[in-house]
Amino acid sequence: MARVFITGSADGLGKLAARNLVALGHDVVLHGRNRDRAQHAMRAVPGARTALEGDLASIEATRALARQANEAGPFQAVIHNAGVYRPGPGRHETVDGLDDVFAVNVLAPYLLTALIEGPQRLMYLTSGLHQGGDPDLRDLQWRRRRWSGSQAYANSKLLDVVLAFAVARLWPHVLSNAVDPGWVPTKMGGPSAPDDPEQGVATQVWLAVSDERDAKVSGRYFYHKRTRAAHPAASDVTVQNGFLAACEQLTGVRLASAVTT
């Protein structure tokens, strides 16, 4: 039995992945952005052990969530599932003065990765839209450019792959991969999305707990249990290091260059 933590598991793909892992007999810890969402997650996933709460749009709350996770752990696997998309005309700013798409989709996974102790497997949900992402790190907060919700989302999903590949490089004893669940009919994807939600969660469940050789790899980009080519920038060490340095500057937390076994 594996212990697995899933961010953003009150609904959508996170909830479905949690249900599947519980059905397989694993010890699952859920997450909601506040108490109501955490309680909703527990009602939505019978058999889960507990649900942690923390708003990933806040650096302070994300640090507190990491402390809760360390108390509830250790975890074999963490699935970084939570994400937001802002298609509207304006940029949303967090309590820390950051673009909230970047804060939730990118900075929170970075911070949780740096602070949660000891997981052996890490999965970062991305999107095929990451292929249209811009690896330019000079205006991560959209303060100088004209806001584009679709571009901000694509950029964030590219940076999720950058993070997954950087962790795979720096932490050779941890399995770190990016997962594209496809375009599925969730609140974010919309009711007309063509992909199957079960297929959308199968890969992260498999990577989290399977002993199959093909699941015990690192530094890969997966779609439906198959590896695909990621945006070339994701494997660029200069991009990785620049991204990690930017996250460290924003949070005051450094991602260690190695882990112990």
Image (spheres, helix red, strand yellow):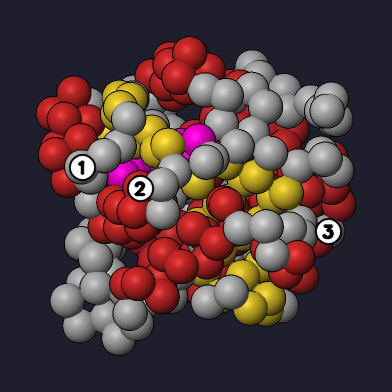
Element carrying mark 2? helix
Answer whether labels 2 and 1 touch (C-beta < 8 Å). yes
Depth check, mark 1 against mark 3: the one in front is 1
Residue 110: image location, x then y, percent? 60, 36
Q: Is residue 144 visible?
A: no
Q: Is residue 114 above or below residue 133?
A: above
In the rendered structure, which segment of residues is drawn in magenta? 3-10
Q: Which class describes the residues within 10 Å of circle 3: few (<14), some (14-19), or many (20+)?
A: some
The amino acid sitting under disc 3 is Asp
Query: Circle 3 is placed at which residue position?
Result: 236
Residue 89: image location, x then y, percent? 25, 58
Element carrying mark 3? loop
The amino acid sitting under disc 1 is Pro
Residue at image coords 57%, 51%: 208
Q: CA distance from mark 1 to mark 3?
A: 42 Å
Q: Is residue 53 visible?
A: yes
